[in-house]
């Protein structure tokens, strides 16, 4: 099970940190993704992190502003979002990848378990 | 980036009839070293998160009804619902995981005629 939290209403230019608490599986065996969905729009992949946190990849739209991280001792995934923009308004989902990721190749798989999402609204 | 294009954007199908959704990638997602297509399909019902249906282009996720099937290779893929049920009303997305950034199609909305 994955449960996201930390969403809310924030002004443009401010920061927010999302969390995703994992349970029911061995968290440190799996790579993890963040995926977002703007209101009425499709799915947009945001970022992925390897099972051990050593390898991370980002969508160009968030690179340099968002940071994905994990604390395997707490079974928790994070997304630190800085310099937020109106276009970052979305439901943010965390999702599990079915393995730890190929760190050497930077290759990650699909998403087999999804959280229910947390809503981020960027507005003045 | 690999662009994923689905067609149609929406379709209306009678209960019990078949539905076909197409997905085309801007470059091949076939890994010739293992002969696997890095293509997944998801179903999203209103107010719910996406649900994995198919991975490796044609492998059905555990618990997914066998009326859902995936096919295709390289750049052209298809999701088929053999006999539409009321609970299949949803938006369906294809996704490539061949490379990062991973990308999704724009979605296809399936409704009952």
Image (tube, rainbow, N blue to C red):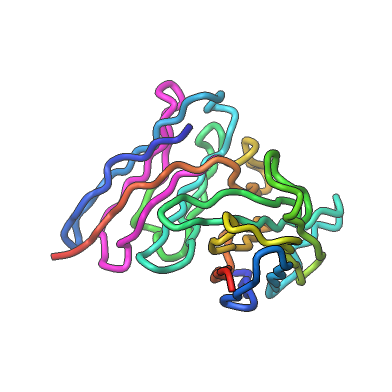
Seen at 60% across and 55% down, the residue is: B42
Query: Where residue B83 sits: x, y (%)?
Result: 73, 61
Quadrant of the frame with the C terminus of chain B: bottom right
Q: Which residues are magenta?
A: A68-96
Q: Judge from the rendering whether residue B34 lies leftward or rightward of residue B79; answer left or right.
A: right
Residues B99 and A3: in front is A3
Q: Quadrant of the N terminus of chain B?
A: bottom right
Q: Nearer the viewer, residue A71 or B19?
A: B19
User: Residue at (58%, 46%) from the top-left corner?
Assistant: A111
Which residue is at 50% across, 36% downward? A53
x 50%, y 43%: residue: A114
Q: Is residue B90 above or below residue A24?
A: below
Q: Note whether A26 is above or below B112 in the view shown.
A: above
Image x and y of residue B19, in percent: 70, 69
| A58 left or right, relative to A112 | left
Q: Is residue A90 magenta?
A: yes
Q: Is residue A82 left or right of residue A69?
A: left
- Viewer-side residue, A64 vs B58: B58
Q: Residue B87 magenta-drawn?
A: no
């Amino acid at each position: 099970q994955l449960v996201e939290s930390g969403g809310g209403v924030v002004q443009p230019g401010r920061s927010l940190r999302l969390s995703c608490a994992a349970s029911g599986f061995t968290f440190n065996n799996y790579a993890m993704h963040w995926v977002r969905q703007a209101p009425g729009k499709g799915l947009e992949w945001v970022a992925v992190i390897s099972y051990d946190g050593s390898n991370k990849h980002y969508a160009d739209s968030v690179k340099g502003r968002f940071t994905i991280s994990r604390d395997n001792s707490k079974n928790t995934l994070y997304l630190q979002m800085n310099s937020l923009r109106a276009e970052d308004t979305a439901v943010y989902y965390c999702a599990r990848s079915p393995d730890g990721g190929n760190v050497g190749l930077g290759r990650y798989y699909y998403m087999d378990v999804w959280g229910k999402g947390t809503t981020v609204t960027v507005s003045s | 980036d690999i662009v994923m294009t689905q067609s149609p954007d929406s379709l209306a199908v009678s209960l019990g009839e078949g539905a076909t959704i197409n997905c085309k990638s801007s470059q091949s997602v076939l890994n010739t070293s293992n002969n696997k297509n890095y293509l997944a399909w998801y179903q999203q019902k209103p107010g719910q998160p996406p649900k994995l249906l198919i991975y490796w282009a044609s492998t059905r996720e555990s618990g997914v009804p066998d009326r859902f099937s995936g096919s295709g290779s390289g750049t052209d893929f298809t999701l088929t619902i053999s006999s539409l049920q009321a609970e299949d009303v949803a938006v369906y997305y294809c996704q490539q995981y061949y490379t990062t950034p991973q990308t999704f199609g724009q979605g296809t909305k399936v409704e009952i005629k």
